[in-house]
Image (cartoon, rainbow, N blue to C red):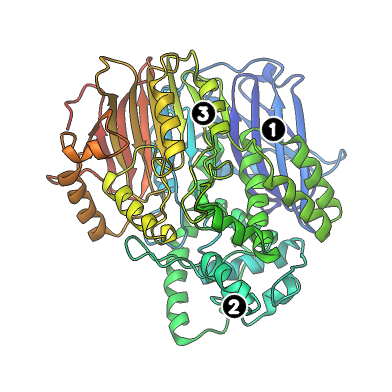
Amino acid sequence: MSSTILAGPILRRASAERLVFWLASRTSLQFRLRFPLHGPLAADNQMHQEQLQVGDHCFIQLLDIQLAEALPNDTLIDYDLQWRQTDQDPWCSIADWAPELCYGEAVFPQLVIRSRIDAILHGSCRKPHHGASDGLVVADAWLAQRHTDPLERPALLMLSGDQIYADDVAGPMLTAIHQLITDLGLYPETLEGALVANSEELFASPLNYYRRSELLPRFEGNRTLRKRFFEGARKPIFTTSSADNHLITLAEVLAMYLLVWSPIPWQPLTEEQPRLSPERQEQYQLERERLVAFVGGLSAVRRLLAQVPTLMIFDDHDVTDDWNLTAAWEASAYGHPFSRRIIGNALAGYFICQGWGNNPDAFTDPMALLQAWSQQPTAAQQDALIEHLFNFTQWHYSLPTSPKLLVLDTRTRRWRADTNLEQPSGLMNWEALTELQSELLNHDSVIIVSPTPVFGVKLIEVIQKVFTWCGKPLLVDAENWMTHKGTANVILNIFRHTRTPGNYVLLSGDVHYSFMYDIKLRYRDAEPHIWQITSSGIKNEFPTRLLDILDRLNRWLYAPRSPLNWFTRRRRLEITPHPPSSAAKGERLLNGAGVGYVKFNEQGEPVLVQQITADGAIAFASKDSPRA
């Protein structure tokens, strides 16, 4: 019975009038929601169930429930999500099909509708085969210690990018993906522009493991694409990224999501190892050891996601490394049918497994195309869906909370460089930034989720700029808010606008280390007050020695009173770092996998900022603590 539900429920949106759940099941199901301790609340609830078949034995479910009677705020609410296969079958209670989703002695999972956002968990960058601990497992243990007090629960969990690594997949994970595709009968697809004609040929190809960059036919026009898209950019300043096992088909992407969010899909899988060279065999075994630990924590991850409203937004690795970094990158990647399909499949997977639950009302048109593909999974239907998603402009969203929450799309509406296509594009174009400003008007405080920090480590931004001058932005992931003059000027002017909020909290990830900056405008007595709070990664870390060097150099060169600041776009800003409590003298950055925790006062100011790691919570600062 328990294996009928493959993944979920993931609680996506939660307000007093509306709940949204995401699940995956082996069969077509009917659902209903009950509140065992609040019986009258179950009467006349309007459940809109959208069911999407993606394989012979796999159905993605989005349950959008309009509540007939508002749920109470700041109260523990037991919920019972029940299912059955036909009208004649009895309803199966969540207490029977997923008792492991409960904390302590509870019989049902519980949720809390917070009256205001007074606390948030947030993080990004969860790579299953990284050696660090899984921050979502840590977050589950943290919540288990305080789950009985509704006021101690966070208002939401914000996942700010790289929930999967579609471009960096371990060999054993790819093996599991292919077994799951077979087990669930996930739909095959045809491929154009590669050495294989369809997904069946891909999976049977000797190039399937660690050699996917060789799938492009070897002629001159493909050389640039192979380097940019499949082989991974060599980044000697920061990291080496490998795309040897880049996900290609939509079935692979969907299987990946199921395998990173739930232990259930792993249960019928067997251990298999493809034929590999001795060097690759050694790599495969190391990745396998790390994946065993990762899978062991998935029950905790599933419980966390069933208890806390969880919002998401993409960053590059949800699709591919350096996604839309430059106009030249776009021309290469979207101009070839094979890479265009790969990008489109990853974006479709994001839509189905992440974006859909963020804001169901925005996805009416793409859902019609998705259902058409589901009923007739042909290449033409898949291409029509992908083409629509490439032109879709509603990936961003906001919540009418207090403070207001805005989640930015910094990937698909870019401000492209007009004169040099190799120059990094701005993270948001003028139109998108204008829409952002209109959303900010007449609010006292706001929380903005930007996957990439608006205010990053200045020395690293300078290194990125130097490589951009040399025409090599891809070598160092040269994308930040200040790299494009137009984007930088507009976002800074938005902060200066007299009718935009007095308090900004910017939540970010992406960079694989964590930090907190306190930012004020020079020559302005009070407003606006900006806090840049970055938590990264959930299961990823920066090379330790390199980060230590960059951290100390940045402090020497770009301290708050350094004259070098006057040669940057931040010259009118006073930026003060808050070091973590665990820092040695001179350290400002924290290199530790986990999740961020931010507690707010009634004015929307952060009063407690922590990185919760497997070794404990590390505080950055409180509002009243002295400046570092």
Contact, mark 3 vs mark 2 (Cβ under 8 Å):
no
Residue type beneath disc 1: Ala
Upstream in sequence: badge 2 or badge 1: 2
Q: Which residue is mark 3?
A: 406
Q: Nearer the viewer, residue 126 or 219?
A: 219
Which amino acid type is marked by label 2?
Glu
Q: Which residue is denoted by mark 2 in the rendering?
A: 214
Residue 380 place in picture, x, y as percent: 83, 57
**Label 2: how many Cα within 10 Å (few below 14, some 14–19, many 20+):** some
Q: Secondary structure at mark 3?
A: strand
Between the C-alphas of marks 1 and 3, the distance is 15 Å
Find residue 470 and report its horizontal and vertical position in percent. 37, 60
Residue corresponding to mark 1: 362
Labels 3, 2: front one = 2
> Which residue does the image show at 34% across and 66% down from the upper left?
236
Residue 556 placement, left or right of 6: left
**Callout 1 crowding tier (Cα within 10 Å): few <14, some 14–19, many ≥20:** some
